[in-house]
């Protein structure tokens, strides 16, 4: 499963093996003897070789997915945001840090919205609209 996930993630970004190797080497500086190469990543994608734990972690970080997802342990990247709000993880919105008190208020707003939604009548427009964040 790992080879397919890695190839899909790389192809989804429209980058070559060499570009991925370069990006990983920039993000995770190391000595020349331990740099990532296109042939190394190609061997991972073809299932010829298996990456180390450290390499899988680097790839997961680069693609912004969990190690469970990239390794095939889980099939989707569902995130329960309520757990993010109560975790010790630093949260940001538009690159601005969210303080502890703001986290609590945002959690309460979302919780209230979802509880109130149960009381509202379902409409024909009950679908998720695309949110334009201007990126």
Image (tube, helix red, strand yellow):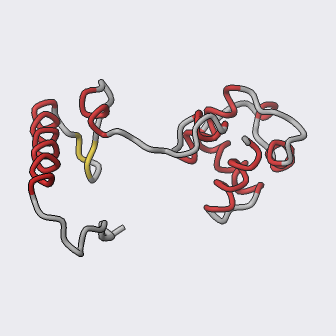
Q: Quadrant of residue 34?
A: top right
Q: Position of residue 104 (x, y in %)?
A: 13, 33
Picture quadrant where residue 112 is located: top left
Which quarter of the rendering shows the C terminus? bottom left
Q: Position of residue 36 (x, y in %)?
A: 76, 40
Percent x, y of residue 45: 80, 47
The location of residue 28, given as percent across then percent down, is: 61, 36
Rendered residue at 58%/44% (across/down): 75
**Residue 65 relative to residue 119: left or right:** right
Report the residue that reaches farthest toward the bottom: 124
Asked whether, in this view, residue 122 is left or right of residue 30, the answer is: left
Q: Residue at x 65, y 44 (%)?
A: 24
- 87 left or right of 122? right
Identify the residue at image location x=73%, y=42%. Answer: 1
Q: Camera-side residue: 126 or 107?
A: 126
Residue closer to the observer: 73 or 98 = 73
Task: Please tell me whether residue 130 is drawn above or below residue 25 in the rendered image.
Answer: below
Q: Give the total number of marks visible in the rendering.
A: 0
Q: Residue at x 58, y 34 (%)?
A: 68
């Amino acid at each position: 499963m790992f080879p397919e996930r890695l190839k899909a993630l790389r192809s989804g970004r429209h980058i070559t093996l060499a570009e991925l190797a370069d990006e990983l080497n920039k993000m995770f500086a190391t000595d020349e003897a331990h740099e990532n190469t296109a042939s190394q990543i190609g061997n991972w994608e073809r299932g010829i070789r298996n990456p180390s734990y450290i390499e899988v972690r680097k790839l997961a970080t680069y693609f912004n997915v969990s190690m469970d997802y990239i390794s095939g342990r889980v099939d989707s990247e569902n995130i329960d945001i309520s757990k993010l709000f109560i975790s010790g993880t630093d949260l940001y919105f538009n690159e601005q840090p969210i303080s502890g008190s703001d986290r609590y208020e945002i959690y309460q707003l979302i919780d209230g919205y979802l509880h109130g939604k149960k009381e509202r009548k379902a409409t024909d427009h009950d679908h998720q609209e695309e949110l334009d964040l201007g990126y």
